[in-house]
Image (cartoon, rainbow, N blue to C red):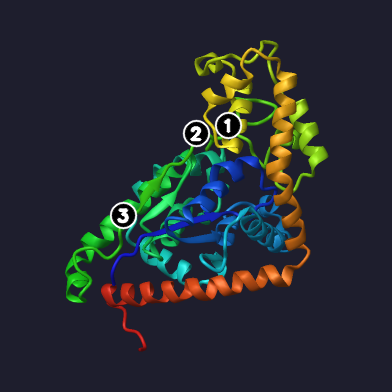
């Protein structure tokens, strides 16, 4: 089995996709279509690792899965040229995760900082799934023998674990890999794709905190489903400081809210922060915010409208996911068949 240059990435269907998700992930997903074979997955199995009140229960999970899919399509991902699917339709994700559970070491998982953050003080009450989340993520990626994974800062450690698992599997089963004609390496070590200057979009209410769907204040974020009036209202209410915008990028230091808004403008316009400040530096925030409103509405309103149209036709969205899952399963089944042979499982056919 030759290794194909392939991108895999996933988004959890936990509702309220926002500008941070769009600029930090989805924009890059769209760009990667031009250079890679891409699989974009709605990771609904991962959603279950959190308490039910976080992912909302069965009805919300189904609705959110369709909404994330709609966001992919509305933003420009082509489900005919690339693969868009939800994780739970491809059972090989769970199957490979079990094999990787037996490859991964407890010490590796104990070092995962995101588990500590999400589990909070009462780690004993956290689900086993939350603890094991990084192993399932490794299975998600390596099931398609993906070579590249777009990741944010919060997922870098998980990708390192995927690389460790791939390396250990290749070492543990090296003789079998070679004897079955797969060469020296079966699972590639996926490389991180770190993209863009605005991969980390901050809250509109507090420039030191990441924009989040879990923030109690809806004014802290711009949701992809927000209409033009709501976008305008949120930007005009966004926290700023009394000083004019600086003319140089170093002037944004120690000014997190200014830095965030300039970063959003730069990312949406495809320009650098320095270029944005060259145009707006020295001016008041009110004028800059008006320009930012116009830009955000121009970029995001068409996405919101198309998402609304798609979500209103769930059977069409489901057909995209089913087709994508069928195509994903064809790749996944080939990987699992080879993995079972390498491990030594007796199987039919």
Q: Residues within 10 Å of mark 1 (few under 14, many from 20)?
A: many
Return the residue at label 3. Answer: 189
Which quadrant would residue 220 be assigned to in this image?
top right
Residue 149 is left or right of residue 288, and the answer is left
Quadrant into which the N terminus falls: bottom left
Say which of 332 and 271 sits in front.
271
Image coordinates of residue 202 in percent, x first then y, are 61, 31
Circle 3 SS class:
loop
Question: Where is 5 relative to 258, above or below?
Answer: below
Residue at 52% from the left image edge and 23% from the top image edge = 274
Tell which circle, 3 or 1, labels the residue nearer the N-terminal end.
3
- The answer to whether marks 1 and 2 mark residues whose Cβ atoms lie closer than 8 Å is yes
Return the residue at label 1. Answer: 266
Return the residue at label 2. Answer: 197
Quadrant into which the C terminus falls: bottom left
Residue 108 is left or right of residue 213, and the answer is left
Q: Residues within 10 Å of mark 2 (few under 14, many from 20)?
A: some
Say which of 282 and 118 sits in front.
282
Circle 1 SS class:
helix
Image coordinates of residue 270 in percent, x first then y, are 55, 37
Q: Residues within 10 Å of mark 3 (few under 14, many from 20)?
A: many
Image coordinates of residue 99 in percent, x first then y, are 37, 66
Residue at 45% from the left image edge and 71% from the top image edge = 92
Question: Where is 296 relative to 151, above or below?
Answer: above
Image coordinates of residue 297 in percent, x first then y, are 73, 40
The label nearer to you, 2 versus 3, is 2
Say which of 186 and 243 sits in front.
243
Residue at 47% from the left image edge and 53% from the top image edge = 32
The label nearer to you, 3 versus 1, is 1
């Amino acid at each position: 089995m030759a290794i194909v240059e392939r991108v895999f990435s996933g988004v959890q269907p936990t509702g309220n996709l926002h500008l941070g998700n769009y600029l930090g992930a989805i924009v890059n997903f769209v760009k990667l279509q031009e250079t890679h074979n891409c699989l974009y997955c709605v990771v609904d199995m991962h959603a279950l690792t959190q308490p039910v009140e976080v992912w909302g229960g069965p009805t919300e999970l189904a609705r959110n899965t369709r909404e994330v899919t709609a966001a992919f399509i509305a933003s420009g991902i082509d489900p005919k040229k690339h693969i868009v699917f939800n994780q739970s339709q491809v059972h090989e994700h769970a199957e490979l995760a079990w094999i990787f559970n037996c490859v991964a070491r407890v010490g590796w998982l104990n070092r995962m900082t995101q588990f500590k953050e999400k589990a909070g003080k009462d780690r004993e009450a956290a689900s086993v799934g939350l603890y094991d989340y990084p192993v399932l993520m490794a299975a998600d990626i390596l099931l398609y023998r993906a070579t590249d994974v777009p990741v944010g800062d919060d997922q870098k450690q998980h990708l390192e674990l995927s690389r460790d698992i791939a390396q250990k599997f290749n070492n543990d089963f090296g003789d079998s890999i070679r004897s079955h004609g797969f060469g020296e390496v079966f699972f590639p070590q996926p490389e991180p794709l770190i993209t863009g200057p605005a991969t980390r979009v901050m809250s509109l209410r507090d420039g030191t905190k990441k924009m989040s769907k879990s923030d109690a204040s809806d004014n802290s974020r711009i949701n992809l489903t927000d209409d033009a009036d709501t976008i305008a209202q949120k930007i005009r209410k966004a926290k700023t400081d009394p000083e004019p915008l600086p003319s140089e990028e170093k002037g944004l230091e120690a000014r997190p809210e200014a830095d965030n808004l300039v970063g959003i403008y730069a990312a949406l316009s495809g320009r650098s922060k320095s270029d944005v400040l060259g145009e707006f530096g020295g001016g008041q925030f009110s004028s800059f915010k008006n320009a930012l409103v116009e830009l955000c509405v121009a970029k995001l309103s068409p996405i919101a409208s198309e998402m609304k149209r798609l979500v209103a036709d769930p059977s069409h969205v489901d057909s995209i996911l089913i087709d994508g899952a069928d195509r994903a399963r064809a790749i996944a089944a080939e990987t699992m068949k080879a993995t079972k042979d390498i491990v030594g499982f007796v199987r039919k056919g």
